[in-house]
Amino acid sequence: MTQDEMKQQVAKAALDYVVTDTIIGVGTGSTANFFIDALATIKHKIKGAVASSEATAQRLKGHGIEVFDLNMVDQMSVYIDGADETNKHMHLIKGGGGALTREKIVAAVADKFVCIIDETKKVGVLGTFPLPVEVIPMARSYVAREIVKLGGEPVLREGFKTDNGNVILDIHSMDIMEPVKLENQLNSIVGVVTNGLFAARPANVLLIGTQNGVNVEE
Ligand code: 5RP
């Protein structure tokens, strides 16, 4: 089975977590795209969705799924999204696609966060995948110097702007031994919008696509 086939099977398995007659949150990326395509087959069962990026909103609308502004939604049953890495505590690195801030906001509102990954994303220690940090453009150099003080190597994601008009610094060469602590440290640097560690609010359910089917961790 290819990595894409594992992503596709785990995306289909996530349909079991869609709560009938509710608004659900939908993530961003290739695994989330497979989920959106699968969701289209049961779209009559939900009221609609909140999108974590412009790209996801377009894909949902393309399937005829109503997209709600988060400010119009006071409750969300579930948020379903991929990740770049996860450890055994369901702490995640997200933001490979640059949508980390909206993803974190939607995840915060949802009652349950179901994370859908293929088996290559499970790691012992987070940090092999460069950790994305969304930064207000004028603070870019200052934030980069502060990240170096924390022991990371920030690299500007060239030619990329987030949906919020900001830049991304990807932090390389960091073994993330204390994800909650680092998430808070990075977020307290002035000029940082947020970072791609989802540790203070980890996933609640992990669905892992493997060569032998889908594993569930709760
Ligand atoms: C986007 C994300 C994605 O969930 C993450 O990058 C995984 O992407 P993919 O499903 O394409 O492997 O956080 O900002």
Image (cartoon, grey):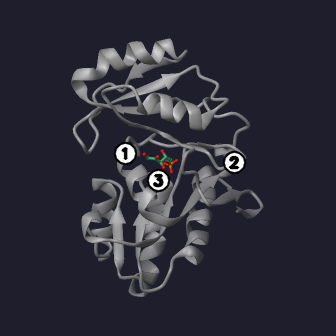
Residue at screen point 62% across, 65% down: 9
Per the image, the residue denoted by label 3 is 30
Q: Three-letter amino acid code at disc 1? A: Thr
| Mark 2: secondary structure | loop
- Residue 22 found in image quarter: bottom left
Residue neighbourhood size for the residue with mark 3, other residues' Cα within 10 Å, grouped as few (<14), some (14–19), many (≥20):
some
Q: Under 8 Å from ligand 1: the CB of mark 3?
A: yes
Q: Position of residue 51 (x, y in %)?
A: 34, 61
Question: If the image is split into quadrants, where does the N terminus sit?
Answer: bottom right
For marks 3 and 2, the one nearer the N-term is 3
Q: Is residue 87 left or right of residue 108?
A: right
Q: Is residue 131 above or below residue 119?
A: above
- The image position of residue 201, as x and y in percent, is 54, 51
Residue in the picture at 60% in, 35% down: 179
Q: State the quadrant of the C terminus.
A: bottom right
Residue assigned mark 2: 89
Classify residue 59 by image quadrant.
bottom left
Element marked by disc 3: helix
Q: Mark 1–mark 2 contact, CB under 8 Å?
A: no
Instruction: Count the labels in the image.
Output: 3
Is 32 on the left-hand or right-hand side of 204?
left
Nearest to N terminus: mark 1 or mark 3? 3
x then y, percent, for residue 184: 49, 34
| Three-letter code, disc 2 | His
The residue at which mark 1 appears reads as: 101
> Which residue type does callout 3 highlight?
Ser
Secondary-structure class at tag 1: helix
Other residues around mark 2 within 10 Å, as few (<14) / some (14–19) / many (≥20): some
